């Protein structure tokens, strides 16, 4: 082979492939720990919107959230943890909580979840 053919060859070295594999494995591990919390957040958001739509008194809204939470396996929040306010004639149910995901040793990933039955972020 002459040098012109050799310099036109491209590819990844074994060391580069090893580093890429380690990075992808670490991302997969973190993703596997984050996905359940994101799924629970979506279930909480759905339960909050359902409780706000059913309306009624504050105890009824909290009970409605607790019923939906028990069906959807929501363990992070209870009816006592949600905030219920009125915006005009509309009931607004909101929530906020932090989730710590242990990574390695003293390293944690902190995710701050916030949501509301009203459209958008509060």
Image (cartoon, grey):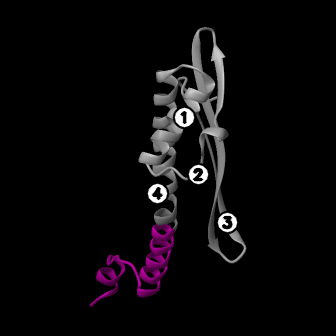
Q: Is residue 24 magenta?
A: yes
Q: How far apart are the alpha carbons under marks 1 and 3?
A: 33 Å
In-front residue for pair 4/93:
93
**Residue 35 marker:** 4
Q: Compared with residue 62, is residue 4 higher up or lower down, i.e. above or below? A: below
Q: CA distance from mark 4 to mark 3?
A: 15 Å
The main secondary structure of the magenta stretch is: helix
- Which quadrant is home to the N terminus? bottom left
The nearer-to-camera label among 4 and 2 is 2
Q: What residue appears at the point 49 percent right and 50 percent down from the top-left corner?
A: 40
Q: CA distance from mark 4 to mark 2?
A: 15 Å
Specify which label sits upstream in the sequence, 1 or 3: 1
Judge from the rendering whether residue 76 lies leftward or rightward of residue 21; answer left or right: right
Mark 1–mark 4 CB contact (< 8 Å): no
Which disc is residue 88 wearing?
none
Q: Residue at x 58, y 33 (%)?
A: 62
Tell me the element at label 3.
Answer: strand
The answer to whether residue 24 is seen in the rendering is yes
Mark drawn on residue 108: 3
> Which residue is at the far bottom?
1
**Which residue in the protein does label 2 denote?**
76
Which residue is at 34% across, 85% downward? 3
Q: Is residue 116 visible?
A: no
Q: Does 15 sit above or below residue 35?
A: below
Task: Measuring from the top left, give residue 41's x and y in whole percent.
Answer: 52, 46
Residue 48 in the image: state x and y as whole percent. Answer: 52, 33
Instruction: Provide the residue designation for mark 1.
Output: 63
Q: CA distance from mark 3 to mark 2?
A: 18 Å
Q: Which residues are magenta?
A: 1-29
Give the class, few, some or many, for how many residues have Cα within 10 Å of label 3's Cα (few <14, many ≥20): few
* Residue neighbourhood size for the residue with mark 1, other residues' Cα within 10 Å, grouped as few (<14), some (14–19), many (≥20): some
| Cβ atoms at labels 4 and 2 below 8 Å apart | no
């Amino acid at each position: 082979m002459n040098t012109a053919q050799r310099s036109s060859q491209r590819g990844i070295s074994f060391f580069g492939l090893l580093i890429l594999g380690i990075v992808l494995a670490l991302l997969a591990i973190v993703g596997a720990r984050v996905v359940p919390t994101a799924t629970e957040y979506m279930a909480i958001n759905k339960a909050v919107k359902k409780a706000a739509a059913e309306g009624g008194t504050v105890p009824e809204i909290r009970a409605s959230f607790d019923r939906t939470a028990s069906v959807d396996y929501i363990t992070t929040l209870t009816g006592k943890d949600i905030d219920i306010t009125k915006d005009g004639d509309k009931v607004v149910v909101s929530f906020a909580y932090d989730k710590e995901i242990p990574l390695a040793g003293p390293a944690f990933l902190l995710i701050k979840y916030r949501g509301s039955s009203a459209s958008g972020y509060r």
